[in-house]
Amino acid sequence: MVILANQTDWLYPFADLPGWSLLSLACGAIGLVVLQEGMRSSHFLSTVGWLLIGFAGAVAGTHVRPEPDQLLFLAFSLTASLGGIFFLTFRQPVHAALGFAQTVLSMCGLFFLQSAPFLAAATMMVYAGATIIIFLFVLMFAQRSVLEDHDLKLHAPRSAIFLITIWLAIVVRGIAQPNVLPPASQPDLRRPSSNETLSVEPSRMVGFGKAMFTDYLWTVELAGSLLLVATIGAVAISQKLAREEA
Amino acid sequence: MTLLTEHILVAGAVLFAAGMLGFLTRRSLILLFLSLELMLAGVSVNLVAFSRHHDNYQGQVFAILVLSVAACEAALALALIVALYRQRPTLDVKSWQSLREFPGSEPTQVDLDAVEMMEMGDPSLKLTPAGKDPLVEPMPERLFTGIHDLRSKKGASIHD
């Protein structure tokens, strides 16, 4: 490991990651493979998969000493990851969608921690509310009561998990490099609200509203036009099909 | 050590990886679209983290834009799924794989008028003709079902 640790040498992408994190990542990936298979076939395999994932979490947990202000972050990340595992492994589509909802709600907790309360509320409404409701509507429309072949079988799960584990290791290594983040940017004084900062406690939402409707007014208008066009498009698609059916 | 931006970035990367994994492995059309939403959610986490890192609202406004794009995508994708379901009553994404171009497909029929117009330099015709006309020659029902068939096909060509 020491010999390979060269900052510029991308031939050895995992050289800087500590061994326990690689062990944890590999155990988690293997556990996910076993769990995905076990959810379809046997309880024994899925128990082994959960044990492997739990072992991966324990390996990571023995090396992380969380400070009190990181506990909430760790809790939300843990529930988000659990929801992701549910989403990936449950074969019944409704259960998978509930895993997705759990992930999104935990993500809203992360938004609160990052002092973005408006965004957290909006995400809760749009993702966990509207998206899940539309999803359940389409599922009611199209899903048979018996699980079909395409629900049970996954498409090349082992190679996909292998590739994405490597991807994740490379990304985490890139993030863990020292001084990888740029320094905080200076406010651009030509814009009216660019010196609004997140730190002023009572006027949080005021600052966000000012930034949205002065500096980024065109962005908001663009988002609104996009929503309008998408609404017209969705209506057009369904109307055309209804006429063809008649 | 307090909560650093890097920690949030790792959480966002994990969410993005889960979405990507779902997109690669799942076969139900609706779950594919939910995987896309999960990837967008991971990107939003990153944007909010950078908003706090730079201590301004730029990232949060961008996250609002991503959120509205996700809402548009939900409406349009589900309308399209319903349209596809009316054509062929299944949610399996593999039932639509005849829409792609498969490896080794050469055009069997070339629109000679189009070629002539292209040679004369009509600027509206830039695309080379590709694929097969399904009306002229129907596609095989199951060309190959996965990487195993692809591998066996390659092996056969080597040994031949």
Image: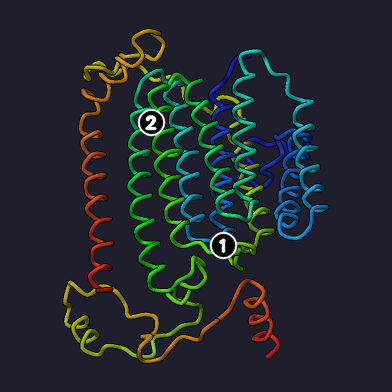
Q: Residue A121 sits in which quadrant?
A: top left
- Residue A137 location, x and y as percent? 42, 52
Going by the image, does A228 lie left or right of A63? left
Compared with A169, B91 (above or below) is below
The chain identifier of the residue carrying mark 2 reads A
| Image height of B95 relative to A117, above or below | below
Residue drawn at (70%, 54%) of the image? A36
Q: Which residue is the site of mark 1?
A: A145
Residues packed near mark 2 inside 10 Å, few (<14), some (14 to 19) or many (20 plus): some
Amino acid at dot 2: Ala
Instruction: Give the residue type that dot 1 points to.
Output: Ser
Image side of residue B52 versus residue B79, left or right: right
Q: Residue at image x 62%, y 50%?
A: A88
How many residues crowd mark 1 within 10 Å: few (<14), some (14–19), many (20+)? few
* Horizontal relation, residue B13 to residue A50: left or right: left
B102 or A98, which lies in front? A98
Q: CA distance from mark 2 to mark 1?
A: 33 Å
Residue A122 numbered tag: 2
Question: Residue A125, image x and y in percent?
Answer: 40, 34
